[in-house]
Amino acid sequence: MVKKFKLQSVLNYRTILEEQAQQSLVLSQQEQQELIAAIASQQQELMNQDHALKQRQEEGLSIAEIDIYESRIHHCRCRSNELQERLARLEKNIIKQRATLLQTARDRQVMDKLKERQETEFRREQERKERIQLDEISLRKKGPTP
């Protein structure tokens, strides 16, 4: 027979909060990986455009073509900077999410320990009562002492 933990609903709630914090962190880390890939792709595009411009300049370009290449390069740089800023904000958010996850895990562990202590105390009390009953039974079997 196990005594029902009175704060089980609180433990369940804290477990849910911890799971939500874990899920949020995982999603942010996935987004971080996607941003890193997008930044690498944007950097590669920038290098390709720069290389193409230099190669075309050796062949001879009109002013209009130079403007087009420079516009593409400018766009790549702006996009890359934008992605870098998003990544920086996301990394700050990830740090906060890790701290939140750590705190929610600690909160849940406190409740787990409380539950374990309560169960241990209940078992000890049950064992004590059983010993008392067994002692009484053995005394009854021996009969009255003269």
Image: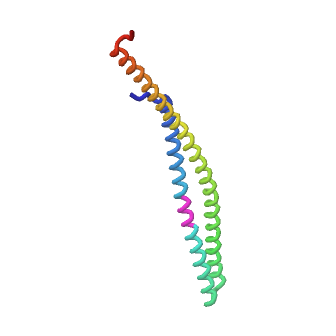
Image coordinates for residue 100, horizontal then vertical, percent: 59, 46
Image coordinates for residue 123, horizontal then vertical, percent: 44, 29
Position of 144 with respect to 40 (left or right) is left
Image coordinates for residue 51, horizontal then vertical, percent: 60, 82
Position of 146 with respect to 109 (left or right) is left
Identify which residue is drawn at 53% across, 42% down. 17
Q: Nearer the viewer, residue 119 or 100?
A: 119
Q: Residue furthest top?
A: 146
Q: Nearer the viewer, residue 7 or 122?
A: 122
Query: On screen, 91 above or below 108?
Result: below
Identify which residue is drawn at 65% across, 78% down. 67
Q: What range of the chain is rendered magenta? A: 31-38
The main secondary structure of the magenta stretch is helix
Q: Name the colouring of the figure.
A: rainbow
Q: Nearer the viewer, residue 91 or 84?
A: 91
On-image quarter of the C terminus: top left
Q: Quadrant of residue 75?
A: bottom right
Q: Residue furthest front?
A: 146
On-image quarter of the N terminus: top left
Identify which residue is drawn at 41% across, 29% down. 2
Image coordinates for residue 15, horizontal then vertical, percent: 50, 41
Q: How many marks?
A: 0
Q: Nearer the viewer, residue 135 or 123?
A: 135
Position of 99 with respect to 5 (left or right) is right
Q: Quadrant of residue 84?
A: bottom right
Query: On screen, 74 above or below 22?
Result: below
Q: Residue furthest left?
A: 141
In magenta stretch: residue 60: no
Position of 106 with respect to 139 (left or right) is right
